[in-house]
Image: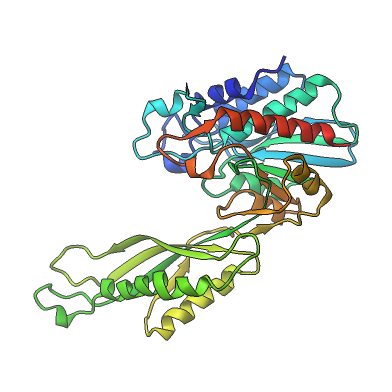
Amino acid sequence: MVQGPEKLLQELIALPSVNPAFLPLGDGRAGEWRVADFLTTRAAKAGLQAEFQSVFAPSQDHPGRANLIVRFGPAKPKKRVLFAPHLDTVGSFEMPEDHFSPRLSGGRIHGRGACDTKGSVAAMFTALLRVAESGGGPRQTEIVFVGLVDEENAQEGSRSLAASRLKADLAVVGEPTGLSVVTAHKGDLWLKLVTLGKAAHGSRPELGRNAVHAMARAIDLLETKYARSLKRRKHPIMGSPTINVGMVRGGTQPNIVPDRCEIQVDRRTIPGETDAEVLREIIIFLRNADLDVKLINSKERPCLPMETDPATPLVRDLMNLVHQKKPVGADFFCDASILSAGGTPCVVFGPGNIAQAHTQDEWISVRSLERATDLLTSFLRSLP
């Protein structure tokens, strides 16, 4: 008999799968392979075969990273549905070991990844095993569980999957949505802005040109006038795009006029906006304020907004199942954007609340986890 998702989630939390981008080289808690191997064993016990799609080649510091793919269904399916949560988690400032010691208290399961997104992994994998064990699965539809790597950094797992031949009629991307079916989410553009000045001794600042002062003006304008202008641009589901100045670096010591200042900016985009248009818009905005600022796109790969028609039959079926009448949007970015751009329509769905993601005391409610598992099981059983 298939165990409940609560037990599976606690087992997954106890297997560290921190994205290597957030840990020093050689840290034993890095990489998704422990979780992938564990799920592979569980799949084999249920009579399901697993395969791996290589994403990162093995190196001295890790045994390679690969998407986990588990299939169930007819040999020649007419339709295909993907369950696509990610296996990696973020790190934290100190990474205490108790982050990987699951704790059940007050109807909540605590631990790194509980919400983002090992809760979705547990719910989706349990739903798949339940359908496989019952022997009454879909006759025309193949169900594919894909445990993706690297979502928390560069989304290389979903980019590899999107570039492959594995397409589907729908992908349900696992993220904490509070059990709402999310049909659209914002894109994410990271920008580096640089001002240059002229160094001088702090006792004679008039002989220099202060790059920090120039950047202070730019920050103020971006966070006030430019941010207000974005509020006039609205998407019917996701609302307005936003901007946030998240990092500032400038100067070397107090008695030197700084000749360089750099900020990092997070600009969330909505459908209809392109990265090139946003870059041009900000450059023109700052030039009109008589500011000479160099602007660089910090992301090597595009992270575009995603939108799927809620009238798509499988999307409509899932929304009806959860008794959701209207489409819902999300402010965060995730793998759904990549898979959608690769030709597979996507929705985002999972247990938990995004407000708990990436927190020091990450948790998910048992009730949300169980409800997600029941809904996903019913959805799979409803497929033709």
Q: Could you say which quadrant of the image residue 236 lies in? A: bottom right
Compared to residue 54, the image places residue 189 above or below, namely below
Please say which color scheme the image uses.
Answer: rainbow
The x and y percentages for residue 384 are 89, 36
Q: Is residue 62 visible?
A: no
Which residue reaches farthest top?
1
Position of residue 135 measured from the top left corner of the image (x, y, whole percent): 85, 21
Residue 8 in the image: x percent, y percent? 60, 22
Percent of width and height locating residue 382: 84, 35
The one nearer the camera, 288 or 239, is 239
Describe residue 62's horizontal placement relative to residue 239 as left or right.
left
Look at 81% across and 20% down and name the residue there.
134
Count up the numbered dots.
0
Which residue sits at x=23%, y=70%? 258
| Front-lying residue, 11 or 253 | 11
Give the residue displayed 55% in from the left and 33% down from the top.
32
Q: Residue at the location (61% across, 69% down)?
A: 274
**Is any atom of residue 350 visible in this view?**
yes
Q: With respect to residue 116, does 212 lie above or below?
A: below
| Direction from residue 299 to residue 317 in the image, left or right | right
Q: Is residue 238 left or right of residue 193?
A: right
Image quadrant holding the N terminus, namely: top right
